[in-house]
Image: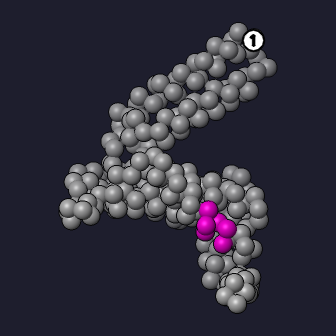
Amino acid sequence: MANFKTHLTGGFAVSGVLGLITYKAGLVDAQQFLMCVLAGTVGGLLPDIDSDNSTPIKMGFDFVSLATAFALVIHWRSELSLVSMILLWLAGYGFVRYGVFAIFTRLTVHRGIIHSVPYMLVLALGLTCLNFYIFDIPAIISWFYGSFLLLGSLVHLGLDEAYSVDLLNRRLKRSSGTAMKFYQDSQRYYYLGLYTILLIFIFISPPFEPFFEKLTDPITWWVLKDEILPQVLMRNI
């Protein structure tokens, strides 16, 4: 399978190019463009969070542990002494970084249910709903963020499948078919729960029609063509 650097570069490159196109077409502003690229890059690393020793899982748990520790201290700052705050910070960090991490790694298997298309769809829709309902971000922009997260994760899964093909010996490696999957019979009950969650997210997700209409509006892409075509013609003269 592809390594961390390849996944990071692939997710960033694809989301960066498509983000620039989206930005140039006027679909997002500068800040939203950066958030789309960030979402796509993070998505390019997400499928490997089920690997106990992978860089994404270590970075992710370090970030979540620090965020949890600081959130606890900020929440209880007015009721605790300095020493108590330090102890609370250490307890919060240690609980997430070592306790939750140990449980998570025991419950997950590399290239298991997390390393699948429906799981990435759940995460993408979850991000879309989070932005729309919690952060009060417009539906169209929320869908852009979720779509870029999904895009980056699909780049990751596609790269892993591509690396499972040995072109020199013209054969498929044992890992072929384990990356971009929709179902695994050995985890049928987990997949049943996963698809149930996916249906729930589809049902509660923000309106999709405005996002789809914006993407398929010919005027959007005519404006982009008017920007690019003259530059191409000038270079050929």
Which residue shows up at 46% across the image and 25% down it?
99
* Residue 167: % across, % down: 26, 64
Which residue shows up at 33% across the image and 49% down it?
111
* Residue 130: % across, % down: 63, 53
Which residue shows up at 59% across the image and 35% down it?
63
Query: Dot 1 corresponds to which residue?
Result: 82
Which residue shows up at 51% across the image and 27% down it?
97
Q: Residue furthest front?
A: 237
Image quadrant assignment for residue 225: bottom right
Q: Is residue 42 visible?
A: yes
Image quadrant assignment for residue 144: bottom right
Task: Please identify the dominant SS of the magenta region.
Answer: helix
Side (left or right) of 21 relative to 57: right
Side (left or right) of 39 relative to 85: left
* Residue 61: % across, % down: 52, 34
The colour style of the image is: one colour
Magenta run includes residue 19: yes
Closest to the observer, 132 or 98: 98
86 to 224, vertically: above or below: above
| Quadrant of the rendering where the C terminus is positioned | bottom right
Side (left or right) of 84 relative to 97: right
> Mark 1: which secondary structure?
helix
* Residue 185: % across, % down: 23, 56
136 to 29, vertically: above or below: above
13 to 68, vertically: above or below: below
Closest to the observer, 62 or 13: 13
What span is in magenta?
16-21
